[in-house]
């Protein structure tokens, strides 16, 4: 019998509805909302199959359209188990209120705010192509509740990446996540710009750390940990990057952008999981061409954070370049701070 697959982290797509139409969004804009029964079944599945930790992310669509369901799920988790279950939410920020800030604080829900900095108004608009987020009014809350920014990097803003980091810091963010838009039309000149910008960010990161004003920057912190760990991250032979997404109807997928792709559907939290397919996807090897790469142990892309519909791990060239740049920057950061 195959060893049980640990499911430590799930993303609950509470609704397909969203009040924004971000230009690079990969989610389906529909009308379906997750039922309380489906959400409870997803939590039950997580608690039955998790290992040393458990994490639930509220996602969408725009999850704050379903604030009552967030309350229900949070209460259900607290009643169901005494163990620590980490909670977070990824929101476009347009529906944030003082009530939710306080609720999230009281229930230890980490808020990740989708915000593209200086180009946010161009990237994140509603159906009328107008921006809705007034980020400045949330500065006090960003600082008080240590809200994380989640920014998408594409060919249009990669040249101001460092300026965006400074902008985010001025808005009160001390934790920043950055995600590459694979669908953007990346060329070699953009990779060169990415390297220059990332090393400028690394230099600022070091400066802030030496001043005792450390800011968490995901792409740097992750690679520094890998660097110091001597690339032992892949020894478990379990794809450490898989965060299982539960669609509004309860269907299970290996990650968010896979939602709706029939070949990658692992079953349903209420009707059952396809265990052979779950094992196969969870144990895929390195993406083709990554076998001899010196940093494949430290690279999420090498482990196939994208899976084709023929069930093969796939790596986008820009993802490969991005991790190599991040690792070089980690080398600089470690040596500058030791």
Image (cartoon, rainbow, N blue to C red):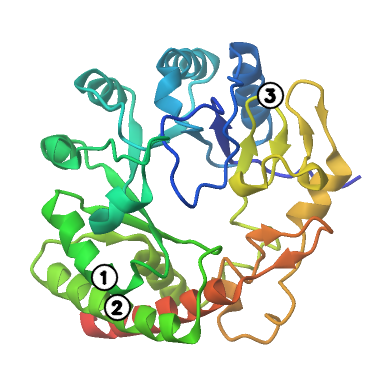
Residue matched to label 3: 249
Q: Could you tell me if the residues under marks 2 and 3 are in contact, i.e. CB atoms within 8 Å?
A: no
Residue matched to label 2: 197
State the mark number for residue 116.
none
- Disc 3 crowd rating (10 Å Cα; few below 14, some 14-19, many 20+) is some
For the residues labelled 1 and 3, the Cα–Cα distance comes to 39 Å
- Element type at mark 3: loop
Q: Position of residue 18 (x, y in %)?
A: 47, 30
Q: Locate residue 327: give its quadrant.
A: bottom left
Q: Position of residue 201 (x, y in %)?
A: 25, 73
| Residue plotted at (74% across, 77% down) | 288
| Residue plotted at (48% across, 81% down) | 324
Residue matched to label 1: 160
Q: Compare residues 135 and 146 and report the one nearer the observer.
A: 135
Left-right relation of 44 to 197: right
Which is nearer the N-term, disc 2 or disc 3? 2
Q: Could you tell me if the residues under marks 1 and 2 are in contact, i.e. CB atoms within 8 Å?
A: yes
Q: Compare residues 326 and 48 and report the one nearer the observer.
A: 326
Determine if residue 66 is in view: yes
Q: Is residue 261 above or below residue 77?
A: below
């Amino acid at each position: 019998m195959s060893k049980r697959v640990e499911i430590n982290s799930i993303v609950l797509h509470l609704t397909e509805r969203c009040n924004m139409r971000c230009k690079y969004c990969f989610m389906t804009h529909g009308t379906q909302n997750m039922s309380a029964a489906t959400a409870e079944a997803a939590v039950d599945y997580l608690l039955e199959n998790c290992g040393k930790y458990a994490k639930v992310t509220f996602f969408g669509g725009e999850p704050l359209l379903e604030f009552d369901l967030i309350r229900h799920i949070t209460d259900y988790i607290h009643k169901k188990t005494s163990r620590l279950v980490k909670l977070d939410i990824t929101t476009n920020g347009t529906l944030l209120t003082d009530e939710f800030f306080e609720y999230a604080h009281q229930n230890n829900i980490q808020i990740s705010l989708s915000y593209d900095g200086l180009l946010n108004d161009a990237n994140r608009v509603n159906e009328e192509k107008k921006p809705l987020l007034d980020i400045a009014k949330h500065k006090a809350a960003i600082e008080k509740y240590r809200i994380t920014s989640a920014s998408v990097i594409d060919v249009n803003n990669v040249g101001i990446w460092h300026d965006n980091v400074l902008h985010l810091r001025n808005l009160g963010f001390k934790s920043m996540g950055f995600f590459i838009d694979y669908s953007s039309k990346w060329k070699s000149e953009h990779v060169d710009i990415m390297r220059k910008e990332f090393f400028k960010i690394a230099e600022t990161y070091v400066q802030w750390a030496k001043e005792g004003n450390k800011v968490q920057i995901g792409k740097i912190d992750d690679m520094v940990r890998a660097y110091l760990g001597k690339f032992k991250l892949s020894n478990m032979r379990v794809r450490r990057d898989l965060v299982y997404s539960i669609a509004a109807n309860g269907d299970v997928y290996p990650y968010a952008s896979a939602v709706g792709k029939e070949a990658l559907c692992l079953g349903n939290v209420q009707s059952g999981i396809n265990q052979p397919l779950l094992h196969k996807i969870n144990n895929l090897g390195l993406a083709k061409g990554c076998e001899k790469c010196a940093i494949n142990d430290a690279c999420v892309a090498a482990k196939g954070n994208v899976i084709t519909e023929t069930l093969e791990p796939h790596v986008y060239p820009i993802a490969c370049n991005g991790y190599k740049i991040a690792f070089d920057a980690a080398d600089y950061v470690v040596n500058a701070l030791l």
